[in-house]
Amino acid sequence: MDITNLTRNNLLINQKSYLAISFILKLQQQGDLWLFNCSEGCQHILTRKQIKISQISKIIITELHISNITGLLGLLSSLSLSSRIKTLHIYGPPGLEEYVEFGRKYSQTNFRYKLHIHKLSTGLVANHPVYQIYSFANYLSYSQFEFLIISKEKIGKFNLDKAEYFNILPGPLYGKLKIGNDFLLPDGSIISGDKFTGEYDLGYKISFILKLYYKRKSIEIGWKSRVLTC
């Protein structure tokens, strides 16, 4: 997963006044883009960074602040003009759906693609085959959300040459060895599955915390995170 910052020079700078935070998550292998917040001039920034808006599959609004949604309607309109067919999912606090609907109505714009707007709450937001997104409502403001993105662990690569060296015939046994099962042979010898696979990739997590201060929830969200944005 690659992160491209769109609005700030450093995602790790702790903010003392409200600053727009917008960035793109690029999912490796899938080719999908997840956009966090859509600030003013977002399309121009994406064009300058040579990022195709057609690849955006999810837009996540962390808070209904004007700095986070100024460029949203323009981006949605541009996707429609580009003859987009792929469904777009938008996640945001309560009130986002009304904002988009009123903006569409008064600008007399119809989107040619399917648009699904999901209301955020604490819990699982999106369950992707490789990644999961969890949202946490800020207890000081339930219209502001923090996020945790977790990549799922990957099973190590099966060592085919080693299996052939031990004369293990191809078949269902390979799959069972790959997930770490052990087998006891008639002569009393043991075949250990972990000896035939590479190391597991335990995955990683990215924490997106809007306000970094000492509280239990922030510590739990950010624990052992590879990237912490605030």
Image: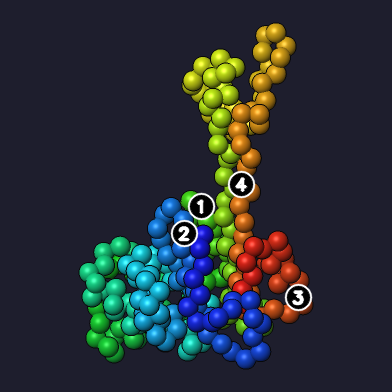
Residues at marks 2 and 4 touching, judged by CB atoms closer than 8 Å? no
Q: Is residue 208 above or below residue 28?
A: below
- In the drawing, what numbered circle is on residue 130? 1
Q: Earlier in the sequence, mark 3 or mark 4?
A: 4
Q: Earlier in the sequence, mark 2 or mark 4?
A: 2
Mark 3 is surrounded, within 10 Å at the Cα level, by few (under 14), some (14 to 19) or many (20 or more) other residues, namely few
Location of residue 98 in the rendering, given as x and y in whole percent from the top left corner: 40, 82
Location of residue 83 in the rendering, given as x and y in whole percent from the top left corner: 22, 69
Q: Amino acid at mark 2?
A: Leu
Q: Amino acid at mark 3?
A: Lys
Q: Earlier in the sequence, mark 1 or mark 2?
A: 2
Secondary structure under badge 3? Answer: loop
Which quarter of the picture shows residue 11?
bottom right
Q: Earlier in the sequence, mark 4 or mark 1?
A: 1
Which residue position is annotated with label 3? 215
Which residue position is annotated with label 2? 27
- Of 144 and 44, which appears nearest the observer? 44
Residues at marks 1 and 2 touching, judged by CB atoms closer than 8 Å? yes
Q: Amino acid at mark 1?
A: Val
Secondary structure under badge 2? Answer: loop
Mark 4 is surrounded, within 10 Å at the Cα level, by few (under 14), some (14 to 19) or many (20 or more) other residues, namely few
Q: Is residue 39 above or below residue 221?
A: below
Q: Nearer the viewer, mark 2 or mark 3?
A: 2
- In the drawing, what numbered circle is on residue 201? 4
- Of 98 and 217, which appears nearest the observer? 217
Mark 2 is surrounded, within 10 Å at the Cα level, by few (under 14), some (14 to 19) or many (20 or more) other residues, namely some
